Image (spheres, coloured by chain):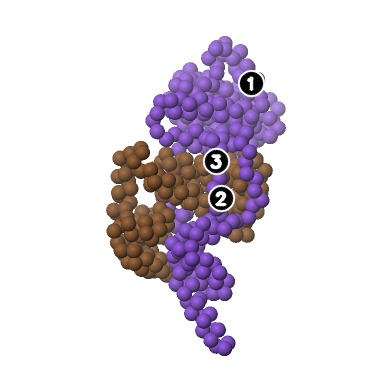
Chain colours: A purple, B brown
């Protein structure tokens, strides 16, 4: 009797093992999927095969050719999460039953309705206009929630430049949105900055994050580089968390500049940047 | 952010709706997720949308990640892949609403040519040892989320033959991969 049971069990495991490749790749029927899942624990070799296939799949996902995401994607995402979300599903979370065609690798089986984000799909004028307005609203919400001192900085800048009517950061359309991240110049540093501007204007917005605190009498200064000429875009201070912002105006379209950097300088600002570069990046 | 403890802390912060942590997550994994989405969809606009959807799912459900069940990157890429495949299926259901010659050309290229997933260093060597048709079938199953029936309909190969070739291809791929892993790990 026991021999019979062992034989049955052995044959059953052979059958399960045969199904593992297709099970791993989500190709088994619902019935086959149930069969595998019901017997996997009792078939160590099948379980080991499945583990191999899972690792192989991980490599297949990781080894796709790497492509840089679109420049504006980061800004859209940050803007999307800065918008107070519609009541999100706060689920007490454990991996749920996978879809039959995608076995246990599926970590989230329940579809989630994403936060509304402007999604450029088709070249329809009204959609573009609506997206532009939405992008303007949400990006401004994001920045203003991130930077408490922004309004004060803007007033300071307006006074300094004597052009109060021009110093508004306005997106004329999403197509004009430019966005770059300036990474830290030192590999081990956390500092970074984001530069956003409208290609159709000379107004830009910079947000600095996790900058080191400076000695008294020092400040940070933003520089834009064009044909080896470095132009100051203004100075700014940071708060106790190392965050700061600068709304700036350029005499030339910002699109014409090729690099941006932020340096530590004496409080009154410098004519040329020092070597003390905190972040630097290509525009 | 490479150690598991860092990842746990990062995801704990994201579950608490910390925007800086979310930004750090994007910095770390945005490129890998976008690349995988692009690999599945072969279209930059759709890949961007899927990348957004993936990150927003993570933003809302960061606490779903269970570090005991695997690395954060694997979890993120799995979400991205399934999101992309879902999107691909949606697009297939309404392929003629917005005809896009470039997309169609790309799709024809995928279906008609050799598989594209062998671009990675290790897998590139392995796939070269599989018959072209088998690698193509694996590509359709894994990166396009096709069922046996879908593949049979698309390739006009009989269903039974698709099943046999796919199973045999997957088994062979696993064997080659294991050989490669063992060779790499041998001192």
Task: Report in which chain the residue with disc 2 lies.
Answer: A
A156 or B127, which is in the foreground? Answer: B127
Q: CA distance from mark 1 to mark 3?
A: 31 Å
Point 63% across, 17% down: residue: A156
Residue at mark 2: A110
**Disc 1: which residue:** A151
Q: Which residue is mark 3?
A: A114
Q: Residues within 10 Å of mark 3 (few under 14, many from 20)?
A: some
Which chain does tag 3 point to? A
Asked if the residues shown at circle 2 and circle 1 are in contact, with their CB atoms under 8 angstroms apart, the answer is no
CA–CA distance between discs 2 and 1?
A: 42 Å
Picture coordinates of residue A238 (x, y %)? 66, 29
Question: Mark 3 and 2 residues: CB-CB less than 8 Å, in contact?
Answer: no
- What residue appears at the point 62 percent right and 51 percent down from the top-left corner? B64
Q: Is residue B183 visible?
A: no
Instruction: Check the image and name the residue furthest to the top.
Output: A162
Q: Secondary structure at mark 1?
A: helix
In terms of sequence position, does the residue under pointer 1 or pointer 3 come before the other?
A: 3
* Mark 1 or 3: the one toward you: 3
| Dot placed on the residue nearer the N-terminal end, 2 or 1 | 2
Q: Position of residue A241 (x, y in %)?
A: 68, 34
């Amino acid at each position: 009797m026991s021999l019979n049971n062992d034989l049955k069990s052995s044959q059953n495991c052979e059958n399960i093992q045969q199904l593992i490749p297709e099970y791993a790749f989500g190709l088994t029927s619902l019935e086959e999927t149930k069969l595998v899942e019901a017997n996997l624990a009792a078939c160590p070799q099948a379980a080991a095969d499945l583990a191999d296939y899972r690792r192989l799949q991980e490599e297949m996902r990781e080894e796709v050719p790497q492509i840089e995401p679109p420049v504006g994607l980061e800004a859209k995402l940050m803007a999307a999460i800065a918008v107070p979300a519609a009541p999100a599903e706060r689920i007490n979370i454990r991996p749920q039953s996978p879809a039959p065609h995608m076995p246990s690798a599926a970590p989230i089986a329940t579809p989630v309705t994403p936060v509304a984000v402007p999604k450029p799909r088709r070249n329809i004028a009204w959609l573009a206009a609506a997206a532009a307005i939405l992008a303007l609203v949400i990006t401004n919400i994001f920045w203003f929630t991130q930077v408490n001192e922004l309004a004060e900085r803007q007033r300071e800048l307006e006074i300094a430049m004597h052009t109060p009517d021009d110093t508004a950061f306005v997106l004329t359309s999403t197509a004009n949105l430019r966005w770059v991240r300036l990474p830290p110049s030192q590999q081990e540093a956390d500092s970074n900055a984001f530069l956003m501007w409208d290609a159709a204007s000379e107004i830009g917005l910079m947000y600095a994050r996790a900058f080191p605190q400076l000695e008294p009498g020092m400040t940070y200064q933003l520089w834009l580089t064009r044909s080896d000429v470095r132009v100051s875009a203004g100075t700014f201070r940071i708060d106790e968390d190392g965050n700061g912002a600068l709304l700036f105006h350029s005499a030339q379209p910002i699109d014409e500049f090729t690099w941006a950097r932020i340096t530590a300088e004496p409080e009154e600002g410098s004519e040329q940047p020092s070597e003390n570069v905190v972040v630097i990046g290509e525009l | 952010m490479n150690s598991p403890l860092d990842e746990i802390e990062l995801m704990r912060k994201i579950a608490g709706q910390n925007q800086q942590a979310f930004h750090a997550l994007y910095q770390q994994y945005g490129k890998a997720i976008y690349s995988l989405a692009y690999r599945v969809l072969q279209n930059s606009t759709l890949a961007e949308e899927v990348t957004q959807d993936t990150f927003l799912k993570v933003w809302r459900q960061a606490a779903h990640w269970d570090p005991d069940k695997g690395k954060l990157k694997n979890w993120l890429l799995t979400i991205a892949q399934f999101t992309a495949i879902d999107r691909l299926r949606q697009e297939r259901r309404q392929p003629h609403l917005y005809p896009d010659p470039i997309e169609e050309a790309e799709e024809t290229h995928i279906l008609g040519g050799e598989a594209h997933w062998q671009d990675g260093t290790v897998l590139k060597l392995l796939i070269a040892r599989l018959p072209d048709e088998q690698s193509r079938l694996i590509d359709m199953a894994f990166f396009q989320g096709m069922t046996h029936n879908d593949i049979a309909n698309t390739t006009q190969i009989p269903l039974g033959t698709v099943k046999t070739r796919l199973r045999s291809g997957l088994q062979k791929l696993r064997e080659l991969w294991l050989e490669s892993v063992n060779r790499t790990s041998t001192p």
